[in-house]
Image (tube, rainbow, N blue to C red):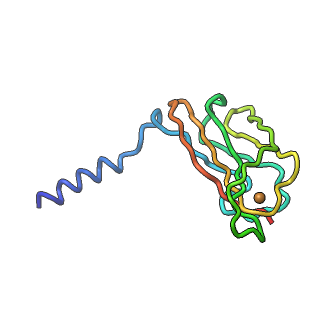
């Protein structure tokens, strides 16, 4: 009976909700959404769970696959500008021309009020 008691105590500790002040910034939404099959994408948005420090945030658009190119490497897309929403939670990437057909990773980094840098990737396909 000793081990189950220890496991139960451990479970209680790990299930305790994180204190709100220690919450790490997270991506809550994006357009296109992760896994989406998009068309004519000219704008990408990333929405975070809290106001992000723009000086510590970045996003890269990487083309990882293209129809008819089996050995496509990673191709960094550079033809976009960035802007932040008034509430500081949404980053908009505006492309000068629509993304060509292919598969894309949007790789982001951001830090919120706790200063801890978080990162993630949104993958979608453009036809
Ligand atoms: Cu390409």
**Towards the viewer: 40 or 70:** 70
Q: Quadrant of residue 84?
A: top right
* For residue 39, side relative to residue 14 (left or right): right
The residue at the point 47 percent across, 32 percent down is 21
Q: Nearer the viewer, residue 24 or 121?
A: 121
Residue 3 screen position, x and y as percent: 15, 58
Left or right, 77 with reference to 119:
right
User: Where is residue 12 shown, x and y percent of the image?
Assistant: 29, 50
Residue 9 location in percent, x, y? 23, 51
| Image height of 125 relative to 115, above or below | below
Q: Quadrant of ligand 1?
A: bottom right
Can you say whether 105 is above or below 35 in the image? above
Mark count: 0
Q: Residue 39 in the image: x percent, y percent?
A: 82, 62
Q: Residue at x 67, y 44 (%)?
A: 47
Question: Which quadrant of the view contains residue 65?
Answer: bottom right
**On-image quarter of the C terminus:** bottom right
Residue that sits furthest to the right in the current view: 97
Q: Give the residue at x 23% y 55%.
A: 8
The answer to whether residue 25 is left or right of residue 80 is left
């Amino acid at each position: 009976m000793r081990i189950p008691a220890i496991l139960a105590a451990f479970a209680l500790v790990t299930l305790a909700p994180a204190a709100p002040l220690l919450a790490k910034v997270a991506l809550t939404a994006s357009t296109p959404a992760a896994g989406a099959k998009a068309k004519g994408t000219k704008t990408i948005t990333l929405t975070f769970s809290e106001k992000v420090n723009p000086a510590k945030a970045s996003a890269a658009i990487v083309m990882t696959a293209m129809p008819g190119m089996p050995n496509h490497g990673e191709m960094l897309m550079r033809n976009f500008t960035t802007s932040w929403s008034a509430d500081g939670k949404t980053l908009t990437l505006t492309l000068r021309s629509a993304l060509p057909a292919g598969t894309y990773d949007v790789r982001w980094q951001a830090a919120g009020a706790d200063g801890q840098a978080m990162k993630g990737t949104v993958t979608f396909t453009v036809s």
